[in-house]
Amino acid sequence: MGIPYENGMFRIKDMLRDKKLMALDIDFLTRIIKRCEILLDIGCGNSRVIKLVQEKNKANELVGIDIGNTYNGHDFLFIKGDGQTLPFKSEAFDCVVCSHLLEHLPQPENCVVEMKRILKKGGRVYILVPKELFRGSSIFLFDSLLLFLSTKKWVSSRHLHLHRFTKNKLLDLFRDFRIVKVLEVRRDILNRKSYLLIAEKR
């Protein structure tokens, strides 16, 4: 599938709205999630992951947490909170998803410690982070430009990527888990890549 054109120009607004084109990695992630009892999406944003998990009937209960007011009406429990200090009891979930959040956190290791705490033994984490040539390259070289051309607003500093993850750095971050696999997956229509890590609590 190619980039949508109109009179030789990008139909930028259409492309930004088309989540199937701009979130191929999330679609892939939700296809391979093992069915579970209760799933937590850390940094749920617009709840795209949760919506797709619902459509695929991959969990009996769904919980999303985000620092912003992002609830958009999907049928799940939304909690406003910080992924680095999760307001849940230990061993409460058997599946955790964290998509394109860790690169934004000042101390992503704190979020990983919390994931381990709230996961049941044998529970799985599914992690997506961008594969970048240098820190922040994906958002500044493309997303910022598209958003500016579409909305006339520049991406605010809260969207800065504070970390660049290599495969080895990601593996080290989850060294206390049993690694199931790390995949390099297509992120969007522009053929940008993401790392998808799947790991289990020992």
Image (cartoon, rainbow, N blue to C red):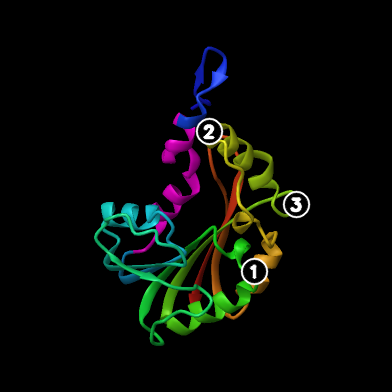
User: Viewed as shown, does residue 65 lie left or right of 164?
Assistant: left
Query: Disc 1 to disc 3, how far (Cα)?
Result: 18 Å
Residue 68 falls within the magenta-colored stretch: no
Name the residue nearer the viewer: 48 or 127: 48
Residue 115 percent coordinates (x, y): 49, 77
* Most distant residue in the front direction: 152
Residue 31 falls within the magenta-colored stretch: yes
Give neighbour class at mark 1: few <14, some 14-19, many 20+ (Cα, 10 Å): some
Query: Disc 2 to disc 1, how far (Cα)?
Result: 37 Å
Q: In this picture, is 140 found above or below 172?
A: above
- Residue labelled with disc 2: 150
Q: Does dot 3 land on a helix, a strand or a loop?
A: loop
Q: In this picture, is 142 found above or below 74?
A: above
Residue 202 seen in render: no
Name the residue nearer the viewer: 52 or 121: 52
Q: Write the residue at 45% across / 51% down.
A: 26
Query: Which residues are drawn in magenta?
Result: 14-34
Q: Amino acid at mark 1?
A: Leu
Residue 176 seen in render: yes
Q: Which mark is residue 134?
A: 3
Query: Disc 3 to disc 2, how far (Cα)?
Result: 25 Å
Name the residue nearer the viewer: 22 or 30: 22
Q: Main secondary structure of the magenta part?
A: helix
Front label number (1 vs 3): 3
Q: Are marks 2 and 1 in contact (CB under 8 Å)?
A: no
| Label located before the other in sequence (1 or 3) | 3
